Amino acid sequence: MSAGSHAGPPALLLGRLNVARALGAGGIASHIASPLPHELAFASRFCTGRIRLPPLDDRDAVVGALLRAGERLDGAPLYFCGDDYLDLVQDRREALARDFR
């Protein structure tokens, strides 16, 4: 599937290139969120937007950035990979559920 043939709204992905590729292969474009300035997933042909997050240890700032992104993405699914993101999403799931599926 080509990068231009995605149907539906993009997902918000907290994570890695391999997940962006897997979602893209399934026809799901991704906005990528990462605290890393040179996150490899930012360069993926399936990346339709980039969100630079604060350091993950500042959870309030990260959740604030995600909620601002969620307002623009209108109910996008939130995908994550890795224990740091899992802990963050689990700890703040009530706040994040407001804007994400």
Image (tube, rainbow, N blue to C red):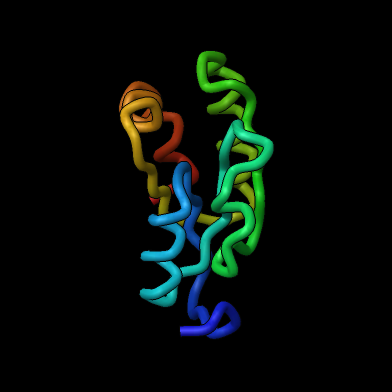
User: From where the camera sits, is residue 12 visible?
Assistant: yes
Q: Is residue 99 above or below residue 92?
A: below
Q: Residue at x 60, y 28 (%)?
A: 64
**Front-most of residues 94 and 84:** 84
Front residue (pair 61, 94): 61
- Residue pictured at 56% horizontal, 78% vertical: 3
- Given residues 28 and 74, the one toward you in this image is 28
Q: Position of residue 71 (x, y in %)?
A: 61, 47
Whether 71 is drawn above or below 30: the answer is: above
In the image, is residue 3 above or below residue 38?
below
Tell whether 36 sits left or right of 22.
Answer: right
Instruction: State left or right for residue 86 relative to residue 40.
Output: left
Which quadrant of the structure image shows residue 39? Answer: top right
Q: Looking at the picture, how far across and down is residue 15, in whole percent?
A: 45, 44
Residue lying farthest top? 57
Relative to residue 47, is residue 101 drawn left or right? left
- Residue 74: image x %, image y %? 55, 56
Task: Identify the image quadrant of residue 94.
Answer: top left
Tally of numbered discs: 0
Task: Please provide percent x and percent y for residue 26.
Answer: 36, 74
Q: Could you tell me which residue is drawn at 34 percent across and 35 percent down? A: 82
Q: Answer yes or no: is residue 70 visible.
A: no
Instruction: Please identify the quadrant where the N terminus is shown.
Output: bottom left
Residue drawn 63% across the image and 58% down it? 43
